[in-house]
Image (cartoon, rainbow, N blue to C red):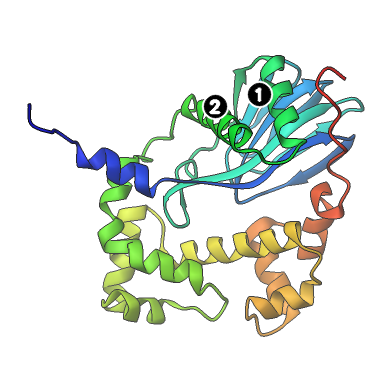
Amino acid sequence: MPLTENFQWRAIHNMIRLELHQLAYADFAWRGRNVHFFNRIFLVRSGEGEVRNHTSSECFRLRPGVGLFMPEALDLRFDFQPGLQFLSCHFNLSVLPGVDLFEKEKHCREFPLETEEINRIVGNISGAPEWRKICETEAFLWNIIACLPLPSGSRPAELTSLSVRYGKLLTFIRENLSARLDIDRLAEVAGLSRGRLSRNFSRDFSMPLKSFLQKELAAQAARYLLGSTLPVREIAERLQFSSEYYFSNFFRRCTGNSPTSFRRANPAAQGTFFAAVPPPGQ
């Protein structure tokens, strides 16, 4: 019998990327509002809280036995009551660099889960990253993600087909991202005129190339603010803004918050988000 293979399956498998920005155990009381450039999943172990999605005017109650998925770029308000304990996962899922498969989703989604499963994963991440535990945790996350329907227009197969046309360009953007990177330079990389590149990009991604650059730049700034203690001035320099003032104005336009208030409104950036992980059952 001849060997038969659907090459598209292998192409998608080799290009899809699950990028974890955070996988941690949270145990704290907090109220705040923020917008992030990555997807979030909360898996509640005990206690209660509330999440309001102001983008789509919906409200969800955090409680044991229920997980909550929150796609990127939503305006969310949180109310974490004392005693709330949950597993927090921040991630991006992409086929092409910077093109998240959930970026068009405007609604949060609840899903059921077993407390025993959360306890097992909490136990995994509380110790050394052993190979079996890594695989088990990865499979656990993929099983959750697989049950989340992709928004209309997010089709991995179609995005994979665009890799020949845009793969080099999107990789260049990811590796050379700064406030000085402009469409003229990208047109040189793509070997197209500025106008043709802009038209093609808007048609294929339903987003102007300029907006894509701003989104990626704001996302990188947010990663610096949340994942480091770098002063705002140094972050502005790293991203090649002409001054801290222009960086702050740019970030405020993209997120609704100044860099300082954005960092202050995110407890993870203040070192207060995560408690030591207690053993399962406690």
Cα separation between marks 2 and 1: 9 Å
Of the 4 image quadrants, the one containing the N terminus is top left
Image location of residue 169, percent across then percent down: 37, 68
Residues 44 and 139: in front is 139
The image shows a total of numbered marks equal to 2
Query: Is residue 11 at least partly visible in the picture?
Result: yes
Residues 176 and 120: in front is 120
Q: Secondary structure at mark 1?
A: strand
What amino acid is at disc 2?
Answer: Ile
The residue at 25%/50% (across/down) is 161
Is 120 situated above or below 125? above
112 vs 101, left or right, is right
The residue pinned by badge 2 equals: 144
Image location of residue 194, percent across then percent down: 32, 77
Image location of residue 5, percent across then percent down: 18, 36
CA neighbours of label 2 inside 10 A, class few (<14), some (14 to 19), many (20+): some
Residues 106 and 275: in front is 275
Of the 4 image quadrants, the one containing the C terminus is top right
The residue at 54%/62% (across/down) is 216
Q: Secondary structure at mark 2?
A: helix
Query: In the rendered structure, are the residues bearing label 2 and label 1 in contact, judged by CB atoms less than 8 Å apart?
Result: yes
The residue at 38%/40% (across/down) is 154
The residue pinned by badge 1 equals: 67
Image location of residue 259, percent across then percent down: 76, 64
Kindly report which numbered mark, 2 or 1, lies closer to the viewer in this rendering: 2
CA neighbours of label 1 inside 10 A, class few (<14), some (14 to 19), many (20+): many
Is 129 situated above or below 233? above
Residue at the left extreme? Answer: 1
The residue at 63%/60% (across/down) is 254
What amino acid is at disc 1?
Answer: Gly
